[in-house]
Image: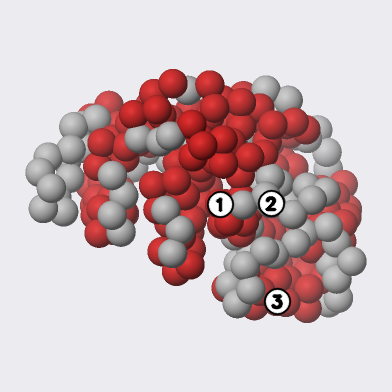
């Protein structure tokens, strides 16, 4: 990727634009997508990252060599997801005074292990990060060790608290708990991985997942007090105990994702 100047302006090469163009649920070709609008949004994100003191050459490396790998993952873990985690990680790092470059790189690598078995993807992601010698250009061995552990600790189902503030940052950033985003991701994952299931079976899985992960006795944990996720988690929990309203939301999102009524 070529990025020009240090005055906040960035140019994206065609390679990058086409790698990161998000696929549509209807499988539309790139020709049907508003490329100009997408590039403008991406430029705004990149400028914001520059304004937050993210290293330009680190950003160029991550955006060109790391993020395109997410295009092969399911919709719940795609480029849109990792970009969101990156942006939230950088904001949290700034808020609490952590190293924004460490937070940025940790977020960028956090789900790369999905190239292998999902159950151990956090461990695999950490190994991918620590084995990438290119990161030595920006980080010390100790920083890379901390980032590796942070990636390993990011899963909501982890049995222990993250070992560093960077683990807490990426774990918190990975939990985009805006209710509709959570609900849509559950449906996306289900339809991607269990296409043979009926709508009613997806509804059952949807409810079970919400109960197991997001309810008052679910396994999700928040690590940074006062984060926006606290408010969002309360909204989700309020909806879990309103099954009729929850079913209306499920029906609408399921139709949007699959076209089925």
Residue shown at the point (61%, 44%) measured from the top left: 150
Task: Please name the residue that numbered disc 3 is placed on.
Answer: 235
Quadrant in which the C terminus is drawn: bottom right
As rendered, which of 182 and 198 lies closer to the eye?
A: 182
Check disc 2: other Cα within 10 Å, few if <14, some if 14-19, many if 20+.
many
Residue 70 screen position, x and y as percent: 51, 33
Give the SS element for disc 3.
Answer: helix
Residue 87, quarter of the rendered image = bottom left
Question: 24 or 47: which is nearer to us?
Answer: 47
Colour setting: secondary structure
* Image position, residue 158 (x, y; %): 78, 47
Q: Is residue 208 left or right of residue 68?
A: right
Q: Is residue 151 left or right of residue 218?
A: left
Q: Position of residue 189 (x, y in %)?
A: 70, 42
Q: Mark 3: few, some, or many residues within 10 Å (few <14, many ≥20)?
A: some
Could you tell me which quadrant the N terminus lies in?
top left
Q: Is residue 59 above or below residue 42?
A: above
Dot 1 falls on a residue whose secondary structure is helix
Q: Is residue 71 visible?
A: no
Q: Taking the image as drawn, is residue 208 in sight?
A: yes
Q: Nearer the viewer, residue 126 or 180?
A: 126
The residue beneath circle 2 is 162
Label 2 with label 3: CB-CB less than 8 Å: no
How many marks the image carries: the answer is 3
Estimate the spatial distance between the alpha carbons at disc 1 and disc 2, rounded to whole Å: 8 Å
Marks 3/1: CA–CA distance: 26 Å
Report the residue at 57% width, 73% height from top.
Answer: 228
Could you tell me if the residues under marks 1 and 2 are in contact, i.e. CB atoms within 8 Å? yes
Earlier-in-chain disc, 2 versus 3: 2
Which residue bears the numbered disc 1?
A: 166
């Amino acid at each position: 990727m070529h990025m020009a100047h240090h005055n906040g302006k960035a140019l994206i090469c065609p390679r990058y634009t086409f790698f990161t163009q998000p696929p549509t649920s209807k499988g539309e070709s790139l020709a049907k997508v508003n490329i100009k609008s997408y590039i403008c949004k991406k430029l705004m994100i990149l400028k914001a990252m520059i304004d937050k003191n993210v290293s330009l050459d680190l950003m160029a490396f991550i955006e060109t060599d790391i993020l395109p790998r997410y295009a092969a993952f399911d919709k719940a873990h795609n480029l849109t997801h990792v970009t969101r985690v990156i942006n939230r990680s950088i904001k949290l790092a700034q808020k609490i005074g952590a190293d924004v470059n460490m937070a940025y790189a940790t977020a960028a690598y956090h789900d790369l292990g999905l190239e292998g078995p999902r159950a151990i993807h956090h461990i695999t992601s950490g190994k991918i990060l620590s084995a990438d010698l290119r990161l030595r250009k920006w980080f010390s061995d100790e920083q890379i060790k901390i980032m590796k552990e942070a990636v390993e600790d990011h899963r909501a189902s982890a049995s222990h608290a993250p070992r560093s503030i960077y683990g807490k940052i990426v774990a918190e950033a990975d939990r985009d708990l805006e209710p509709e985003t959570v609900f849509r991701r559950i449906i996306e994952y289900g339809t991607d991985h269990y296409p043979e299931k009926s709508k009613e079976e997806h509804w059952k899985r949807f409810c079970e997942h919400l109960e197991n992960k997001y309810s008052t006795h679910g396994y999700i944990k928040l690590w940074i007090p006062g984060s926006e996720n606290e408010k969002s988690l309360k909204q989700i929990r309020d909806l879990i105990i309103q099954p009729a309203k929850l079913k209306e939301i499920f029906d609408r999102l399921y139709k949007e994702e699959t076209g089925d009524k």
